[in-house]
Image (cartoon, rainbow, N blue to C red):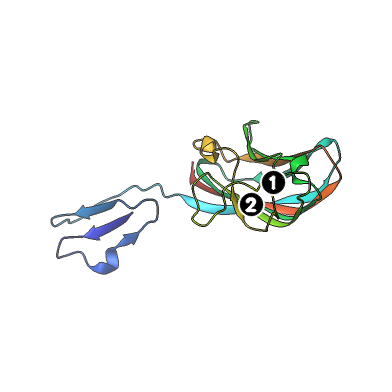
Amino acid sequence: MQIIPAAPNIGSSDWLPFSASTEIVVVVGALSSCTFDWIVGRTDTFTGTGGTISTADTSEFPVSVEVAGEIWEIESVTLRGLVHPDSQDLNIELQAPGLFKTSLSAYRGTGSQGFDGDYVFVDLGSAEGADTYLPTSGTILSETYESSTDLDEFHGKDTLGTWRLLITNNGATGSLDNWTLELRYKRY
């Protein structure tokens, strides 16, 4: 959002740039004083641990978010150094504090595709150039993919607490170097 001065006694140095929306507010008339209360969102990235993705188990990789706020959106979830020989053996989920969770990728693939790289998951339809879901055939490239479910389900949830990346593995052992959670939120 941007306040555009319309009165002749307000100079361009008084403009206040915001990126919360594309809405434009035009202030008309001469103002001797004015007070605005703004709640401006911010985006932060939080890095979680990695480790072994155990066979026939669910591995939990936590990240602590120590900022109280209300989620506007999940910008992205990035898995760095994800290695596993068979993508269809994995169900990858994001769990918020309070146990709410959603799937990023649910048992995708054909049995001959593996993970070996960095993978970014974004909300359905939110990123230009993102391949849709992880492919069901061919090579899984280190790229940006849409999540299996709508990340907008996190809208309005609290940011504060321990977030978890949950990877349920029905096959061979794998590994994850680390992961990041990028949140856009409003502070309380």
Q: Residue 39, percent across and down?
A: 40, 46
Q: Relative to 117, is 53 on the left or the right?
A: right
Question: In percent of the image, x 42 and y 50: which residue is there?
Answer: 40
**Looking at the rendering, which quadrant does residue 9 occupy?**
bottom left
Tag 2: residue type? Phe
Q: Relative to 186, is 59 on the left or the right?
A: right
Q: In the rendered view, would you say 8 is above or below 49?
A: below
Q: Is residue 182 visible?
A: no
Tag 1: residue type? Val
Q: Which mark is residue 46?
A: 2
Q: Nearer the viewer, residue 101 or 47?
A: 101
Among numbered discs 1 and 2, the one appearing first in the sequence: 2
Q: Mark 2 falls on what kind of element?
A: strand
Measure how far apart labels 1 and 2 are at the Cα level: 7 Å
Question: In percent of the image, x 52 and y 57: which residue is there?
Answer: 129
Q: Nearer the viewer, residue 30 or 181?
A: 181
- Can you say which quadrant of the picture contains the N terminus? bottom left
Q: Residue 174, percent across and down?
A: 83, 48
Q: Crowdedness of circle 1 by 10 Å Cα count: few (<14), some, many (20+)? A: some
Q: Nearer the viewer, residue 24 or 91?
A: 91
Question: In percent of the image, x 52 and y 53: which residue is there?
Answer: 43
Q: Which mark is residue 149?
A: none
Q: Relative to 109, is 74 on the left or the right?
A: left
Q: Which residue is mark 1?
A: 63
Asked if the residue under mark 2 is in contact with the one under mark 1, i.e. CB atoms within 8 Å, the reply is yes
Q: Mark 1 falls on what kind of element?
A: strand
Q: Is residue 66 visible?
A: yes
Most extreme residue toward the top, as rendered?
99
Q: Residue 45, percent across and down?
A: 60, 54
